[in-house]
Image (cartoon, rainbow, N blue to C red):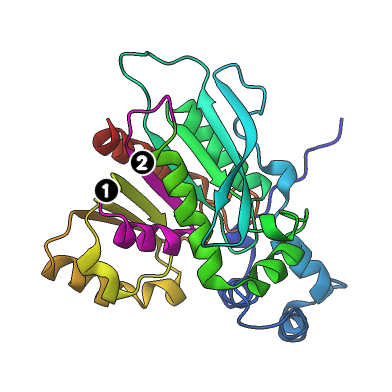
Amino acid sequence: MSTPERRLTAADFDQDLLDLYDYYAHGRISKREFLDRAGKWAVGGLTAAAILGTLAPNYALAQQVAEDDDDIVGEDITYASPDGTGEITAYLVRPAETDPERPPAAILVVHENRGLNPYIRDVVRRLAKAGFVAMGPDGLSSLGGYPGTDDEGRTMQRSLDQEALLNDFFAGFEHLAALEGTNGKVGATGFCYGGGVVNRLAAAYPEMAAGVPFYGSMPAEIVPSIEAPLMFQLAALDQRINAMWPDFQKALEENDKRYEAHIYPGVNHGFHNDTTPRYDEAAARLAEERMVAWFRTYLA
């Protein structure tokens, strides 16, 4: 009987290489630049292209909750985004059984900078299994939707008008706020690009009930407009995003905002994404438990 191949983790890579991949994944350097600079780690017959392949998402791993799980009912829907890119496709998942006297709250799930990939769809199902109506819009809808690879998705998302793209998620929030069968309260969570969107949603919609942004951009100037209680999930090794935190936290304190911040030691940007070596199971599970508890507190 063959032994299952060991899953790679961040500990298998030099931190400088992980930081280099982060720059590539967020469009700060090109694929060619990554391959050129990653060559220093290409030893023993290992190529820079192979290194990139080991760091890239493996979506065969992206299923903690199956699509046919008996506790949930999911469907792909569309909603209008008149100030955005047009008609948006989204993945909407509900608990299979709810108490009509206590309808569930709704949560918007905002993807990273590459479209509605299998990992984010699984996050939507996890939140539905936890008892919420959850919806993940695909910001690439106007271009045909998530193309099946993150490299293509990243290029497609970068080509969009960014204000229109943001409005697509704003329209998703409004769609959930008007959705029948919920208690009328809407929260939001998002990852990377999506974490930044959650912060902007909180500033744009004072009625937003709660938010949990994961390692997203944090412009301090939006803080005075935020009313929702926010839980920030940050990675201690994520220098790029964490550089924004001191000013943002100062603004939160000066404006007397309700928030919690958790900075997980020894983990990288993207630690919640269970399809890449940057995934940290312990930190991801704790962050998810905290997220669900936060939503149960403020969306009940």
Badge number at residue 186: 2
- SS category of the residue bearing label 2: strand
Residue 192 visible to an observer of this rendering: no
x and y percentages locating residue 200 in the rendered image: 37, 63
Q: Residue at left 35%, top 76%? A: 244
The residue closer to the viewer here, 33 or 107, is: 107
Residue type, numbered disc 1: Glu
Q: Which SS class for mark 1?
A: loop
Question: Measured along the vertical axis of the image, is residue 104 above or below residue 134?
Answer: above
Q: Residues within 10 Å of mark 2 (few under 14, many from 20)?
A: many
Q: Quadrant of residue 18?
A: bottom right
Q: Quadrant of the C terminus?
A: top left
Closest to the observer, 47 or 242: 242
Q: Is residue 224 visible?
A: yes
Magenta stretch encompasses residue 263: no
- Left-right relation of 136 to 46: left
Residue hosting label 1: 207
- Give the mark nearer the N terminus: 2 vs 1: 2
